[in-house]
Image: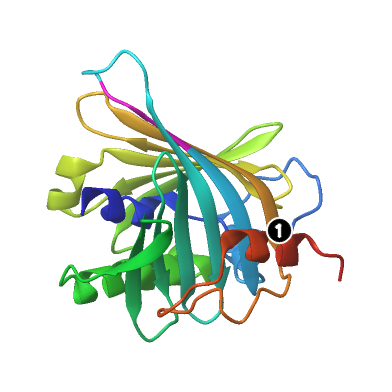
Amino acid sequence: MKRIAHITFFTVLLGLTGGRAQTNAPISLAQISGATSQARTIFTRFVQERHLSLFNEPLRSEGFLCFQKPGHIRWETTAPYKSILVSDGSGVAQFEWADEKWKKLDLGLGDALQNIVSQIASVMDGRFASDQRSYTATVTNAADAIVITLVPKNESMRKMMAAIEVHLAADLKGTRRVVLRENGGDYTDIQFSEQIVNQELPSTTFDRTAPVAIEQIRAAARAKP
């Protein structure tokens, strides 16, 4: 469940596609939200490193995120294990790779998982800027990047997560990195690459019964319009 819960934070602000002119003027959350809301579909690769004080080396995983309005999410880990969390907007399913095929899991967490993907979808839709109930947000403008720091307002959440740092390209055309700062010094660093927006994805990308292979989704996302 801990692995799943982190998805809520991983996908903050990934939908930036609108871009902005290169100026020295400070950027606001409203401008960021406006850029985010222009994304109809998103395909991106992630590499995640979890840095824990108990280990000398970070715990590394990688995979792909797919998003499509309204509320369609697919978070697929490809290494070191294989798993899929997928929502078609009306329900959620989980799969793990076993015996050379996808096995659907029944963990009894339907409502919790639906809540997670709903939060992801609201972020992708650009609604986070107007929602000041969950986080206190500050924006730092640098010459080559924009960093948004989100501090949870909920006391229970703050016990788990001290802050979330979102590193954006200066032109708002993509998210480079998300860092999850935990109390005690542990942190998770997620790097994003191969981000493609507003490309048609296969109709079975978000199928809760038999999700299509990620290789087919990747090929479709990279195909020329």
Q: Amino acid at mark 1?
A: Ile
Q: Is residue 50 magenta?
A: yes
Quadrant assignment, res 180 = top left
Image quadrant in which the C terminus is located: bottom right
Instruction: Please give the name of the residue rendered at 32% of the width and 50% of the height, measured from the top-left corner.
Output: 6
Q: Is residue 202 above or below residue 161?
A: below
The answer to whether residue 225 is left or right of residue 44 is: right
Q: Nearer the viewer, residue 139 or 212?
A: 212
- For residue 161, say whether it is visible: yes
Q: Is residue 215 above or below residue 47?
A: below
Label 1 crowding class (10 Å Cα cut-off): few <14, some 14-19, many 20+? some
Q: Nearer the viewer, residue 115 or 220?
A: 220
Q: Position of residue 179 (x, y in %)?
A: 43, 36
Q: Nearer the viewer, residue 100 or 122?
A: 100
Q: Position of residue 81 (x, y in %)?
A: 39, 44
Which residue lies under the disc numbered 1?
196
Quadrant assignment, res 198 = bottom right
Q: Is residue 40 above or below residue 45?
A: below
Q: Which residues are magenta?
A: 48-52
Instruction: Please give the name of the residue rendered at 34% of the width and 76% of the height, measured from the top-left corner.
Output: 92
The answer to whether residue 139 is left or right of residue 86 is: right
Image quadrant in which the N terminus is located: bottom left
Q: Position of residue 214 (x, y in %)?
A: 58, 61
Instruction: Please give the name of the residue rendered at 37% of the width and 23% of the height, measured from the top-left corner.
Output: 58
Residue farthest to the front, as pictured: 99
